[in-house]
Image (cartoon, helix red, strand yellow):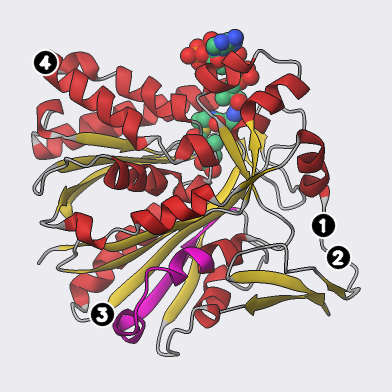
């Protein structure tokens, strides 16, 4: 049975910061942020967006009534959740109008959460072929103002419908994975911002990639020539390129050229949004599908997922016939075109805005946020969500 990604959608907030402006404000050569790191714009979540609303907005656009009837598993992968107990998936389930006969929960393992969700969904559909699963990666990446990680922040979500006979991509049989308990990036429960050992995290990302790539080759006998493209978790767009370069000499010149050219296309959305942790790999996949117009059915795409702490996983999927008919490219183009730039000063202000934590009730101005689903305020320590549609 073919199981895979039937639909894929993304959402990013309507505000962004230009990386040239951030570089100037931080007294850094803009070349470092644009070329050295590979980021052009950074999505910024206003106070009316959080992990729940980003996830719900990403899912809202892709589901029709038949999907809603068949979805009985909803998984949100996130590492910037709003509650230590209640899952983001439960809020999302209500906000997008799913039926009650469903399992809903949140998964955490740094940027790996959505991949864990997908593997679980694959097993669920294998056991219940008439059912569908909704898997969402949703995150707001925060390192803090004036930190070296600041340029790698971002906000957004990617939602995927997993089903049998998928219209976009079918998962292949094998997976290769590895775990090691390391401290490259973490966020203790008392901190709003992540802690990171930047250089070490880069080394580990590559070292895990090399381990799972070798493991996958052994299991499948596939080599560079067999891949049309390889998509990477993209904490910033230069990172995946560094990992890709470590294996390029295994292939012929044509393989190197193809994989490098497709890597460039696979970073289209990521360089304009920034790191969205759990969703970054899938945003890269979406960039490739929507921006490379001549991909052929049957083409194989490799997928490298990395979640600090750490786990790495490699798997692959195969493009299905007529997949282009089932993308939401025009909708995503509109969303990007409608975004507004904010100055660095305004970004710093928005970055520090918080809902009260003392139980005081607050109503937010939701008219400024064009998103369908927003945080309208807080009351009795309960976030108030509104679906404006
Ligand atoms: P840094 O120390 O600010 O930057 O940290 P750098 O000095 O390493 O410079 C970066 C690059 O810019 C270098 O290129 C420079 O040469 C270049 P590279 O050698 O790397 O190819 N450069 C310039 N290029 C052009 N013109 C110039 C110029 N100046 C310098 N004028 C770092 C950078 C990424 C470490 C930092 O931003 C950081 O700590 N980010 C957060 C951590 C991170 O993203 N780690 C990635 C791997 S871990 C991961 O992916 C998991 C994660 O997503 C979390 C999760 O799993 O939940 C983070």
Q: Are marks 4 and 2 in contact (CB under 8 Å)?
A: no
Q: Mark 3 Cα within 10 Å, few/some/many (few <14, many 20+)? A: some
Q: Are marks 2 and 1 in contact (CB under 8 Å)?
A: yes
Residue 357, disc: 2
Is residue 293 within the magenta segment? Answer: no
Q: Which residue is mark 3?
A: 131
Mark 2 and mark 1: Cα distance apart in space: 8 Å
Residue 252, disc: 4
Residue 354, disc: 1
Q: Are marks 3 and 4 in contact (CB under 8 Å)?
A: no
Mark 3 and mark 2: Cα distance apart in space: 40 Å
The answer to whether residue 5 is seen in the rendering is no
Question: In terms of depth relative to the viewer, which is nearer, 294 or 297?
Answer: 294
23 vs 290, left or right, is right
Distance from mark 3 CB to nearest ligand 1 atom below 8 Å: no
Query: Secondary structure under badge 4?
Result: loop
Mark 3 and mark 1: Cα distance apart in space: 39 Å
Question: Which of the image's four quarters has the N terminus?
Answer: bottom left
Quick one: label 3 or label 4, which is nearer the N terminus?
A: 3
Mark 4 and mark 2: Cα distance apart in space: 58 Å
Q: Position of residue 25 (x, y in %)?
A: 77, 23
38 vs 15, left or right, is left
134 vs 109, left or right, is left
Quick one: label 4 or label 2, which is nearer the N terminus?
A: 4
Q: Is residue 301 above or below residue 31?
A: below
* Foreground: disc 2 or disc 1: 1
Question: In terms of depth relative to the viewer, which is nearer, 12 or 81?
Answer: 12
Q: Mark 2 Cα within 10 Å, few/some/many (few <14, many 20+)? A: few
Query: Secondary structure under badge 2?
Result: loop
């Amino acid at each position: 049975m073919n199981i895979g990604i039937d639909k894929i959608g993304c959402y990013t907030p309507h505000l962004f910061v230009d990386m040239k402006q951030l570089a100037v404000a931080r007294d850094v050569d803009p070349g470092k942020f644009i070329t050295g790191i590979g980021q052009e714009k950074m999505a910024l979540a206003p106070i009316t967006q959080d992990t729940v609303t980003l996830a719900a907005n990403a899912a809202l656009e892709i589901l029709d009534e038949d999907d809603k009837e068949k979805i009985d598993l909803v998984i949100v992968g996130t590492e910037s959740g709003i509650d230590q107990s209640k899952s983001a998936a439960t809020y999302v389930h209500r906000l997008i109008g799913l039926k009650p006969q469903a399992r809903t929960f949140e998964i955490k393992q740094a940027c790996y959460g959505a991949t864990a969700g997908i593997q679980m969904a694959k097993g669920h559909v294998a056991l219940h072929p008439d059912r569908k699963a909704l898997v969402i990666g949703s995150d707001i990446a925060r390192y803090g103002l004036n930190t070296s990680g600041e340029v790698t922040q971002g906000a957004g979500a990617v939602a995927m419908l997993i089903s049998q006979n998928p219209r976009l991509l079918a998962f292949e049989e094998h997976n290769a994975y590895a775990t090691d308990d390391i401290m490259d990036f973490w966020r203790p429960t008392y901190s709003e911002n992540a802690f990171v050992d930047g250089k070490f995290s880069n080394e580990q990302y590559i070292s895990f990639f090399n381990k799972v790539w070798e493991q996958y080759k052994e299991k499948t006998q596939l080599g560079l020539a067999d891949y049309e493209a390889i998509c990477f978790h993209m904490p910033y767009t230069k990172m995946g390129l560094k990992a890709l370069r470590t294996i390029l000499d295994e292939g012929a010149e044509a393989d190197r050229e193809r994989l490098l050219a497709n890597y460039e296309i696979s970073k289209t959305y990521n360089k304009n949004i920034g790191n969205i942790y759990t969703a970054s790999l899938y945003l890269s996949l979406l960039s490739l599908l929507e921006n490379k117009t001549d991909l052929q059915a049957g083409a194989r795409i490799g997928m490298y997922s990395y979640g600090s702490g750490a786990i790495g996983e490699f798997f692959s999927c195969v493009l299905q016939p007529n997949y282009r008919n089932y993308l939401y490219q025009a909708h995503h183009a509109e969303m990007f075109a409608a975004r507004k730039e904010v100055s660095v000063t305004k970004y710093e202000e928005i970055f520090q805005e918080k809902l009260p934590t003392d139980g005081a009730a607050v109503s937010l101005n939701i008219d400024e946020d064009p998103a369908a689903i927003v945080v309208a305020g807080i009351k009795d320590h309960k976030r108030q969500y509104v679906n404006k549609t």
